[in-house]
């Protein structure tokens, strides 16, 4: 195994172009586990740790441009206001040591359905900034996950950053695991209210071959909120609407039975989390509206 | 705050019956018995400086690697090692055919385990070949190049498949001592316990409850994986530095396979990172020595976590069917039970586990009519053997669920129902053994119930819900929705020491001499310190018995006689007893020496009752007769002695009658849980424990043992389970990613109430501590979850799907 250690971003892109099978490694919290278990033995490891810009973030405009290697700890500490859903998700990642090393770029690169960041990114709305010697392109998060542990990156591309829409309303993230910390998701759910566009977005983790949005549930809820004038009135959402939304979220799952949980449980739990996170975010929205009135 | 508090109270909450042992000799010497002296290894372990067996290093050493079977049950058609042997850096590859003698099997009791697979593998992960190379990665890759051709055989995985008429036999041609008593060759051992007439008694029962319970396969999950270093010696022997629970037991099994006389196999205990029963059997001991002897070089083997899951036995999964009856006034009429333990592919400690499950199968209750059958199966599942609680754990989970059911049927309070039927000193066990030391079962239950309850809805704060206090924790699954509190109680009984007639002794060598102008005691035993705090306690005993400040604990090795196993809650009792005994003999010799040297100077030398205190010989009135330095200067005093507790008897193979156990220990728990009833997630808020320890030699260590055992019991209640695929008998979760053990956020506050009621038969009146709290913790948590959910929950661990109807 060859270890490539570019000193800068351009050099990294050149190395990736030259060795398209090279596996990028930053925090190493995914890649090293795979190597230690001998699940993969790449010919080249491409170490991105000497590239400072990957650890930086920018908050100008209506997006956060989050460097691929910004560790979860920094997101929790510094981006709670701009990215509340992702900050909550970051808090559930593994242990403090792992959160000090791991970043969103790794979650996206691995594209495991169990990655904790995915539901939050899907709910917030994001674009993956992929770069190669050929140039930069922005991949909408909805198009990024292409299969189990597969993503839309070309072999010569590296993730430079993620551009995540700044929160314009309450966001929530819930994750079910069978212990109270340091656990891989049995399933997870992210929800973001976007009062600016009067839309609700969702993200489901570990309950389908890829992270997914509950499209039908979103459409149903968006329509129901609009028709009922809820965004303006700030009334509590009718329980039957919440219930139907939860059912549609559960129906959006395509889970499997595995050692961490049953498919039936995953579907059930996503429904419960959908109901609760919608209730929590809507309560926050109402409180904020009242505060503004 | 989410962090567990150490809250220990000794003898709080009322006046117990019985009295703790009063100590005269050494009572004025600091750091003796009864003090919470700190462990010498504590700070090193917390700061990461402690040298574990995996840290061993030797110049020019090679690394050993084991190739394990990828299937559970198969004939080995061929093994091709040529490519592995041709790998640069590889020094040796060995298979069954390369073993040096005709002794090619080993085992704790039954020698049924091949050192390397012989023509057949019987479980997933069985060692097939071993490799030594100059780098661990080269060894690993070379092992992967060994080509093994398997022809898969049908598997047996449970009682139905194992005892079917056409069942494939896991071991053909058995010759062990149990084969005559078992109804099927895939049943390893069967122990009935018959007392009174359960069938007749059942007719007098006003209430009868039945249940079938399932106990999952728990792993010891010690943090220091199996590891050791074998160094060839000039005399043709080998010196093994090893993390184990019992040096001499390893030695006894290793030497014949290596073809060496026992004195040429030297064993020194290396740093042990936990054991919990999982190091009672051999793991890499023989493999490392074989490779060292073959290559003439030191060989180190360290398992990684993945391999560790295959490298040691686990706790037996069990199916337990119970019938309990009671009269209208709440008296137990009878208990009938059938306990089926899955022993997996090799015997390990299964026969003794069966003996425990059977003899302790009704729990700490008085029942005159008992009919119990316990058995262990041979299957193609991973081998199971010793783990903290040893058969008593599975039974406690079932009989305590039954006691709740029966209390409800009778219409009595669950704790009062237990107290009414609780055994006490003088009670007769189902084995016919009279309990002849304190058995404060009712008192422990009373105390644990009387402890203050944790406040309701403690997650609520002015800033909203503190999710750390709620089920799901920081995963943010509830802010209080669906959360219901439940409370549950349980009590258990565990034997201390090795039972059923086993010659369970320990050996201690104690020396008193003057070093740098000070009297110093050296204590040399082969006791494995596995984290239990034994070295701390042995030093305390020596200080108390010899009245000296300085005690050196010699590293444990086989240059001294056997200490027996660090298991069965026995080391403080048995090796502590041996050290106490040896110290007493040293003390006599020291006093004799003093009389010889100084007897003429003071008439008190002629009296009995002289004590060693604070480095001096004193009268029982405290008058100083001489400095120990002056007494032993130039004449070191040394004693090596074996020490035994009272003998036990085997259980009758048909009736289970016999005085089979040395001592019993008791603990009771109250669990308080919050269950998210919609998501099926559990947060254990508090696990209060009351335990009788006879005499707390080191109160801080006692609290640590109780809290540790409690946490391990919590683990099997709500998360810990090795999942074996029933279609393939392969382990599905051999990693800490998917075998979950409790984190600090899962560990509740564990208030501990310790009783000290002396057992007059034991040194200082002590009672083994380590296992009892592991028993009652699990059923208390299960009872609390049942209380919160109203569900029956007949299996452990409880998973979210069991609480949400989505299993």
Image (tube, helix red, strand yellow):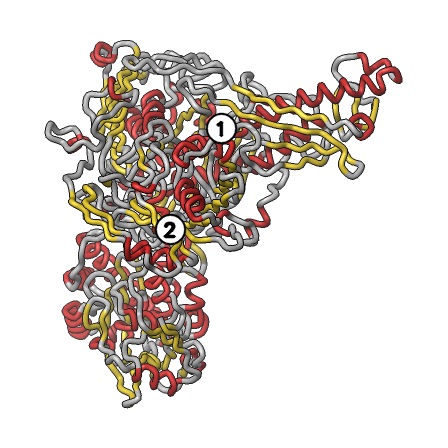
Q: In this view, does B241 lie above or below B512?
A: below
User: B23 or B635: which is nearer to us?
Assistant: B635
User: B142 or B724: which is nearer to us?
Assistant: B142
- Residue at 20% from the left image edge and 25% from the top image edge: B185
Cα separation, mark 1 vs mark 2, equals 34 Å
Q: Is residue B82 visible?
A: yes
- Residue at 14% from the left image edge and 61% from the top image edge: A251
The crowd level at tag 1 (other Cα within 10 Å; few <14, some 14-19, many 20+) is many
Q: Name the residue under label 2.
A: B92
Tell me residue A186's x, y (percent): 27, 56
Q: Mark 1 points at which residue?
A: B564
**Splitting the image into 4 quarters, where does residue B582 fall?**
top right
- Give the number of the disc on residue B463: none
Q: Is residue B466 visible?
A: no
Q: Which residue lies furthest to the front in this view?
A: B235
Q: Residue furthest bottom?
A: A134
Tell me residue B490's x, y (percent): 38, 30
The crowd level at tag 2 (other Cα within 10 Å; few <14, some 14-19, many 20+) is many
**Element type where label 1 sits in the image:** loop
**Splitting the image into 4 quarters, where does residue A22 fall?**
bottom left
Tell me residue B779's x, y (percent): 34, 34
User: B128 or B166: which is nearer to us?
Assistant: B128
- Residue at 30% from the left image edge and 15% from the top image edge: B653
- Residue at 28% from the left image edge and 35% from the top image edge: B317
Camera-near label (1 vs 2) is 2
User: A24 or B287: which is nearer to us?
Assistant: B287
Q: For this view, does B714 lie left or right of residue B758? A: left
Q: Mark 1 lies on which chain?
A: B
């Amino acid at each position: 195994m060859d270890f490539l250690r570019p000193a800068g971003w351009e050099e990294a892109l050149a190395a990736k172009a030259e060795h398209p099978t090279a596996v990028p490694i930053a925090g190493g919290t995914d890649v090293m586990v795979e190597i230690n278990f001998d699940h993969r033995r790449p010919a080249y490891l491409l170490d991105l740790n000497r590239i400072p810009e990957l650890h930086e973030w920018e908050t100008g405009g209506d997006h956060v441009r989050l460097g691929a290697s910004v560790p979860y700890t920094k997101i929790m500490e510094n981006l709670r206001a701009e990215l509340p859903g992702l900050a909550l998700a970051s808090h559930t990642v593994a242990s403090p040591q792992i959160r000090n090393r791991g970043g969103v770029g790794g979650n996206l690169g691995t594209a495991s359905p169990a990655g904790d960041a995915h539901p939050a990114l899907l709910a917030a709305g994001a674009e993956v900034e992929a770069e190669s010697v050929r140039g930069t392109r922005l991949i909408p998060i909805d198009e990024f996950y292409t299969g189990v542990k597969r993503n839309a990156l070309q072999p010569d591309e590296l993730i430079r950053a993620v551009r995540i829409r700044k929160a314009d309303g309450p966001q929530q993230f819930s994750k079910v695991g069978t212990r109270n910390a340091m656990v891989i998701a049995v399933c997870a759910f992210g929800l973001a209210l976007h009062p600016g566009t009067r839309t609700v977005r969702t993200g489901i983790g570990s309950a389908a071959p890829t992270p997914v949005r509950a499209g039908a549930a979103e459409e149903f809820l968006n329509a129901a909120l609009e028709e009922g004038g809820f965004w303006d009135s700030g009334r509590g959402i009718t329980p039957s609407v919440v219930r139907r939304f939860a059912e549609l979220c559960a129906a959006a799952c395509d889970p499997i039975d595995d050692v961490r949980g049953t498919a039936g449980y995953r579907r059930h739990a996503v429904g419960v989390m959908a109901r609760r996170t919608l209730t929590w975010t809507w309560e926050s929205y109402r409180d904020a509206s009242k505060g503004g009135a | 705050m989410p962090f567990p508090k150490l809250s220990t109270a000794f003898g709080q909450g009322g006046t117990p019956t019985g009295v703790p042992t009063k100590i005269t000799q050494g009572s004025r010497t600091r750091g003796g018995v009864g003090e919470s002296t700190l462990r010498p290894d504590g700070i090193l372990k917390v700061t990461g400086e402690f040298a574990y067996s995996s840290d061993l290093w030797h110049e020019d050493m090679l690394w050993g690697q084991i190739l394990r079977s990828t299937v559970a049950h198969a004939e080995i058609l061929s093994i091709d090692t040529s490519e592995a042997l041709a790998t640069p850096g590889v020094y040796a590859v060995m298979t069954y055919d390369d073993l040096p003698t005709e002794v090619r099997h080993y085992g704790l009791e039954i020698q049924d385990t091949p050192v390397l697979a012989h023509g057949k593998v019987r479980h997933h992960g069985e060692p097939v070949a071993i490799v030594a190379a100059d780098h661990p990665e080269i060894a690993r890759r070379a092992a992967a190049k060994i080509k093994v051709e398997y022809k898969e055989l049908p598997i047996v995985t449970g009682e139905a498949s194992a005892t079917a008429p056409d069942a494939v036999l896991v071991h053909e041609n058995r010759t062990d001592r149990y084969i005559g008593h078992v109804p099927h060759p895939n049943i390893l051992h069967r122990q009935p316990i018959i007392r009174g007439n359960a069938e007749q008694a059942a007719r007098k029962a006003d209430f009868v409850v039945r249940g079938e319970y399932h106990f999952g396969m728990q792993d010891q999950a010690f943090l220091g994986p199996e590891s050791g270093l074998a160094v060839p010696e000039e005399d043709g022997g080998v010196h093994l530095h090893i993390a184990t629970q019992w040096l001499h037991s390893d030695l006894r099994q290793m030497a014949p396979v290596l073809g060496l006389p026992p004195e040429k196999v030297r064993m020194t205990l290396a740093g042990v990172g936990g054991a919990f029963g999982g190091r009672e059997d051999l793991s890499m001991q023989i493999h490392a020595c074989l490779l060292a002897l073959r290559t003439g070089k030191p060989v180190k083997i360290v398992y990684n976590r993945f391999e560790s899951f295959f490298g040691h036995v686990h706790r037996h999964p069990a199916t337990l069917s119970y019938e309990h009856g009671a009269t209208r006034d709440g008296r137990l009429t009878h208990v009938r039970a059938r306990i089926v333990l899955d022993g997996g592919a090799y015997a390990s400690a299964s026969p003794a586990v069966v003996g425990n499950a059977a003899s302790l199968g009704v729990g700490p209750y008085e029942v005159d009519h008992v009919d119990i059958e316990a058995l262990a199966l041979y299957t193609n599942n991973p081998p199971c053997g010793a783990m903290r609680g040893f058969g008593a754990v599975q039974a406690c989970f079932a009989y305590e669920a039954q006691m709740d059911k029966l209390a409800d049927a009778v219409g009595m309070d669950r704790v009062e129902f237990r107290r009414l039927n609780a055994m006490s000193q003088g009670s007769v066990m189902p084995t016919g053994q009279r309990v002849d030391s304190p058995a404060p079962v009712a008192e422990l239950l009373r105390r644990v119930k009387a402890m203050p309850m944790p406040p309701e809805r403690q997650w609520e704060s002015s800033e909203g819900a503190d999710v750390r206090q709620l089920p799901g924790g920081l995963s943010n699954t509830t802010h209080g929705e669906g959360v219901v509190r439940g409370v549950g109680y349980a009590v258990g009984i565990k034997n201390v020491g090795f039972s059923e007639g086993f010659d369970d002794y320990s050996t201690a060598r104690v020396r008193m001499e003057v070093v740098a102008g000070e009297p110093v005691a050296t204590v040399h035993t082969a006791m494995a310190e596995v984290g239990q705090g034994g070295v701390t306690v042995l030093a305390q005993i020596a200080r108390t018995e010899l009245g000296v400040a300085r005690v050196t604990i010699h590293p444990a090795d086989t240059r001294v006689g056997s200490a027996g196993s660090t298991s069965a809650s026995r080391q403080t009792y048995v090796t502590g007893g041996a050290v106490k005994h040896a110290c007493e003999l040293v003390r006599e010799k020291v006093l004799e020496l003093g009389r010889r040297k100084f007897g003429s100077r003071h008439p008190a030398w002629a009296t009995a009752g002289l004590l060693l205190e604070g480095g001096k010989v004193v009268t029982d009135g405290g008058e100083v007769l001489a400095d120990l330095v002056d007494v032993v200067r130039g004449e070191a005093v040394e004693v090596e002695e074996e020490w035994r507790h009272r003998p036990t008897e085997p259980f009758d193979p048909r009736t289970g009658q016999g005085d089979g156990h040395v001592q019993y220990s008791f603990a009771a728990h109250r669990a308080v849980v919050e269950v998210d009833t919609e998501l099926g997630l559990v947060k254990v808020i508090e696990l209060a424990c009351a335990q009788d320890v006879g005499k707390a030699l080191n109160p801080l260590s006692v609290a640590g043992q109780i809290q540790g055992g409690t946490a391990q019991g919590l683990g099997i209640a709500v998360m810990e389970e090795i999942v074996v695929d029933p279609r393939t008998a392969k382990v599905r979760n051999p990693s800490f990613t998917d075998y979950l053990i409790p984190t600090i956020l899962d560990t509740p506050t564990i208030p501990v109430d310790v009783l000290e009621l002396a057992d007059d038969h034991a040194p200082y009146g002590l009672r083994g501590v380590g296992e009892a709290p592991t028993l009652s913790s699990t059923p208390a948590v299960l009872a609390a979850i049942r209380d919160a959910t109203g569900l029956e929950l007949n299996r452990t661990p409880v998973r979210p799907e069991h609480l949400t109807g989505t299993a």
